[in-house]
Amino acid sequence: MSSPTTASAVARGVAGEMVVSSPGRLASRWTPWLFLLAPLLLLAVFTWVPVANLFFYSVTDWDGVSPDRSLVGLANYRELVTRPELFRVFLVSGYYLAASVVQLVLALYLATVLSFKTRFRNLFKGIIFFPYLINGVAIAFVFLFFFKPGGTLDSLLALVGISHDRLWLGDPALANPSLAAVSVWRYLGLNFILFLGAIQSVPGSLYEAAELDGATRWQQFRYLIAPSIKPILGLSVILAISGSLAVFEIPFIMTGGAGGTTTFVIQTVKQAFVFNKVGLASAASVVLLALVLLITWIQRRIVPDERVDLT
Amino acid sequence: MTTVSSTPTPSSSARPTPPRVTYAARPESPRRPTPRWVRWSVTTGKYLSLVAVSLAMVVPLVVVVFTSLKTHEEAAVSNPLSPPHDWFNLHNYAVAFTDGRMLPAFLNTTFILVISVVGNIIVGSMAAYAIDRFEFRFKKLVLVLFLLATLVPSVTTQVATFQVIDTLGLFNTRWSAIALYMGTDILSIYIFLQFIRGIPVSLDESARLDGASSFTIYRRIILPLLRPAIATVVIIKGIFVYNDFYVPFLYMPSSDLGVVSTSLFRFKGPFGAQWEAISAGAILVILPTLAVFLALQRLIYNGMTSGSTK
């Protein structure tokens, strides 16, 4: 890796000497920074300044509007752990986490099945993937109709003879599983297409060779498919965990957080922008950020990621 | 079978082992044929499961399409699963389009989408060019800053991001969304970085020998060769911006600034129980996505796989 870089450096030096009108040494030293000016500025203003501010706000009692705010130390964090109703939202994430296990297994099955020769393969592929592309508000409306009393689900159940209507979104025992099911419907296609892409990146000749050697379908899965999807599986698990902590759209639009369906993000948004408790909301965000980073770190330890080296 | 001895005693069951070992060790062992009924049931199970999943995906949508074509009375009394009487009753679509303020919504979304996607491409490709083609001090630090930023989910920092947008005077303008879509997405930098490595450095060098400046090289050589990566970014970013609800909902509360998601969301308020109108609104928002998907299927699949593997 080092030889091409030095070669190009030499070439550049030679060019600088030969072409008289080329910019001087000072200018060329600044060239990369000119290209990085806009990206770094955006990165700083919209990622690093907010992160730094978040930590600062989390130790104040700021309401987000008034000019004065005072440092309160760890009081916000203490409030977070001592008020159980604030911690409840993490239990709600559990439903989405469980749903994403179902989602990953189902996606893996579908990707494996469709990587073999199948009739109407492209049609199945398109049908399974398309929901992922649909606007979240539209999905929420489709499933409000699906779950409403006398809606799609109740009518389908009536077809098979089960005919007492339930409040799928109103009953606290059913609301979270129903919403988590919508999440599976929405994101299954993404996992499926990622797995399928990984499986198909294995050259077809390998499958043919395995077939000739008499490998069963299970052996093909175990020794050819499984290794090829390992990196993407690791990524999907991370996305599933951080995604289940950051659920917002579907429950916010469908139930508004009623009936015990408030998620972490709904709660934080309400605290910051409805109850003007920016300090407390920031402390909660810091906790979430720390959790996501911890999970990512653990994943990187378990599945070493060779793609990270960028130099 | 390998009945060597003719005595059918219970102990004979242990005997066939030696001949079987030699049999299995022979290199040209013919494949054990799977019984036909096993194959048949595996195939049937496979297609049954595929059809079941497909129905689960399609039925909720089809029912909403049905409802969107029904009259108000029809929607109120008929079974949701029954098709509409008149397949060309587009009245609800007209209501959703005008009362849902869909035309300004599509215009707002298009405006935000075009500017933020173009900006994202310029910013991302410039950063990738600088990082891949130059040696400079603090290069490692710059890389780490970009890398760590991918790990920070933007929902977690929204409380503080809001203050930044407010301080910049962007709150309740289209520029708030544009700035956030451009500034908080680092993914495109990785897509470009991955791709730019495949462009031979010798191309840059020969251009430099011809007297081309760094900017000319970026503009005339790198950017045109990045076209496949640009397609990926356009697809991933485009889908994200069109579907995003969180950012416009939080930063653009004015009803004049409604984008597709927020306008659809607000449409439900006054039309609370008129499911035929709400259904038409939802389908109206889904249709452009379906059209784009059918037209660009292959590109979208490729974009998804190359985008998320970084």
Image (spheres, helix red, strand yellow):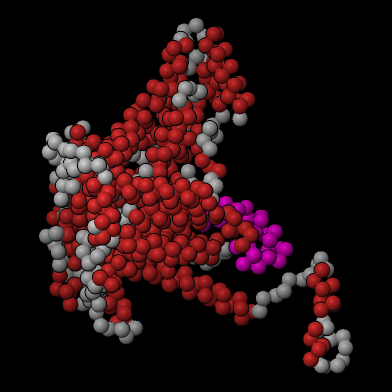
User: What residue span does the magenta drawing correspond to?
Assistant: A196-221
- Nearest the eye: B80 or A176: A176
Asked if the stretch drawn in magenta spans residue B244, the answer is no
Left or right, residue B99 beside residue A40: left
Q: Is residue B131 above or below residue A189?
A: above
Considering every residue shown, the one lying at the far bottom of the view is B8
Residue found at x 50% / y 6%: A20
Considering every residue shown, the one lying at the far top of the view is A20
Residue B66 occupies quadrant:
bottom left
- Nearest the eye: B213 or B83: B213
x, y percent for residue B88? 23, 66
Q: Is residue B280 above or below residue B5?
A: above
Asked if the stretch drawn in magenta spans residue A201, the answer is yes
Residue found at x 65% / y 68%: A216
Residue B175 occupies quadrant:
top left
x, y percent for residue B292? 36, 51
